[in-house]
Image (cartoon, rainbow, N blue to C red):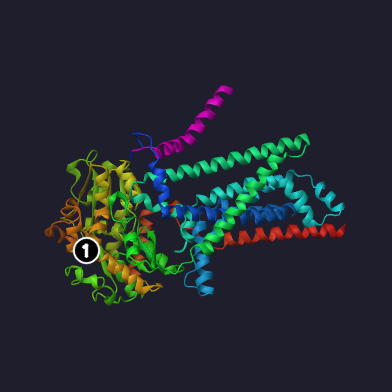
Amino acid sequence: MKRANRILTILMFIFLYIPMVVLIVASFNTGKDITQFEGFTLRQYGELFRDQDLLGLLGNSILIALLSTAISVTFGTLAAVGIHRLKPKMRKLVMSMTNIPMTNPDIVTGVSLSLLFVFVGTGLLGNRESLNFWTLLIAHVTFGLPYVILNVMPKLQQMNPALTDAAMDLGCTPVKAFFKVILHEISPGIVAGGIMAFTMSLDDFVISYFVTGSDFVTLPVEIYTYTKKPIQPKVYAMFTLLFLLIAVLMVGMNLLQIRAGRKKDSKRPISKPWQIARRCIAVAVALALVVGGGFLFFGNRQEKIILNVKNWGMNMADGTDDTLDIIAAFEEKYPNIKVNMSYYESNEALYSQLKNGGITVDVIIPSDYMIHRMIEEGMLLKLNFDNIPNFQYVDEEPFKNNNSYDPTNEYSVPYTWGTVGILYNSKYVDEADVTGWELMWNEKYAGKILMIDNSRDAMGIAQYLLGYDVNTPDKAELQACADKLAEQRPLVQQYVMDQIYSTMENEEAWIAAYYAGDCMLMMENNPDLRFYLPEHQGFNRFTDAMCIPTCSQEKEAAELFINFMCDPEISGANMDYICYASPISEAKNHMEEYLAESDIIYPDSKILEKGTAYKYLGGDTARYVESLYQAATKTADNQEAGGSLVIPIAMLVVLVGAGGGLWILKRKKRKR
């Protein structure tokens, strides 16, 4: 039996740590393919330490983790003492409230905190940007507090209550007794809780995603955008260093606790070297907090304009794969401007972020129908084309003339255009089945189909299949399309946006509807992938354009950025990276020849005639389409959750408990 337990334990540890071993090995691999070790190198680590942007993001994550941990440990320890002093029934109630942030799904916590911050910051205080560094810090403290309390409470229960009474009988005040007796007894729980709060904060993505503003972005939020491209080896190096940092921290803390336990059992004082070691750790943490805070508040004080740009994930050349680093080139031309780039997954996600408020954005790049909607709702500023002379290079047809989304050409400048078609794996999909959109409903490939996860494209595909107008407001036709999507749901492996890359390239799925440019990127990484447009049924031809939202603080700088992107050479270099079509014909002269001549990126004009553009359907119809899509495609476990005030109330209860505990200590002292 013991042998079986040992084998099971070993297998469990192998299962837990083999991914980290693969990651560490990959960080020293000369090749980019993690399945083949081609040779040992430290090049990735050199590239990592030369990448100031990536190191800056890492610094942001460490800073927010240190600050939130320090606050969580302070208030969590006081709260635990207060809760411990409460009566059993009240203690049980407060602990139930305390555990809510841990038991609640992260997405519910993130959304609820985001709504609260926007309500308070924008609605009550009148701030234009209510999501910032401080909201991120508060959110991390919110989910860090329960971990500290959970680790400190058992130590308080194990402690002999007579120790505190004896200390106060000998003349200690409640505060002095807390520091001299209680804090000493519960220190292992404080350390354990602090480590848990630090690690949870360091790798948090979901909650951070909803409460992050444009001024402060953490590493996990940024890494999420890397799903559209293969992860660069220097990221493996960074993850390896983080893993080693956490491992050393955990081992060091465990050794200190073991050593302290032995000294306590032997009733001998802790040796001088161990005292020095503990003090060094405390000083190191304090210095990290001071230096980090100094960096945050003073290190970035430079007279530069901050330009906040929101783009589709990995939808701009960044210097990888020997491409031009667009942002670096812009900042070199305009050294007084610093660009902050953030990302979104869909037009609907961008619309929600802007509509909810709380953020400041200067340039956005939505699609045609969403631009029309934003114009109708007064969410965009008119452009001053005196600052955008390169607009002259944009093709007349169909971007300046016959433009349905911005017919007066006052609010937008085209960025890219493309089509929506079907990507399939020729190894597994029979060519005889590749006829039209009905492939997405073929039961033969059940569980291997990916459906695009946004209401307009998904409903549009059903409309093309059923022969309806993609811009119809007819509710009966829209309901029929929703029924068709519901019929497809049992066949769909998952509804995706950027997640499609790894899934299709790794052949976990075989069929997907997606954008032609992104399909081209996936085809480069997997030669068995094929792309086609259902010409006889129709398809979407879209345009993404650069706009300035009404929340912009730097309109003139935003127009300089838009003008820069319209330079034919810059546009061509950008298209080399993102594999989309440029609205500037001259940009083809600056693109790789195979891309400029690709019939996937630039289909024949006769084929393009079969494509249609989405139009804004109006507020009521758009909401109706969204509700139909959600009902047809989302299962019960993906339903929205409410209760935006539950988390803040729980946090308030914890703080009240801390105050109550100190009051009880003081009351006991007075009685004596």
Residue 388, visible in the rendered structure: yes
Quadrant of the image containing the C terminus: bottom right
Q: Position of residue 206 (x, y in %)?
A: 47, 54
Q: Mark 1 falls on what kind of element?
A: helix
Residue 141, visible in the rendered structure: no
* Main secondary structure found in the magenta portion: helix
**Structural crowding at the residue carrying mark 1, measured as other residues with C-alpha within 10 Å and reported as few (<14), some (14–19) or many (≥20):** many
Q: Position of residue 257 (x, y in %)?
A: 67, 40
Q: Which residues are magenta?
A: 1-30
Residue at 40%, 68% in the rendered image: 361
Residue at 27%, 62% in the rendered image: 477
Residue pointed to by mark 1:
568
Residue at 62%, 57% in the rendered image: 71
* Relative to 290, 672 lies left or right: right
Instruction: Decide: is 275 above or below 122.
Output: above
Q: In this rendered view, identify the residue nearer to me: 535 or 212.
A: 212
Q: Quadrant of residue 31?
A: top left
Quadrant of the image containing the N terminus: top right
Q: Quadrant of residue 324?
A: bottom left
Q: In this rendered view, identify the residue nearer to me: 609 or 315.
A: 315
Q: In this rendered view, identify the residue nearer to me: 326 or 519.
A: 326
* Relative to 141, 418 lies left or right: left
Q: In this rendered view, identify the residue nearer to me: 459 or 58.
A: 58
Taking the magenta stretch, the answer to whether it contains residue 476 is no
Q: Position of residue 125 (x, y in %)?
A: 54, 74
| Amino acid type of the residue that numbered disc 1 sits on in the rendered structure | Pro
Residue at 46%, 38% in the rendered image: 20
Instruction: Decide: is 176 above or below 28.
Output: below
Q: Quadrant of residue 564?
A: bottom left
Q: Position of residue 651 (x, y in %)?
A: 62, 59
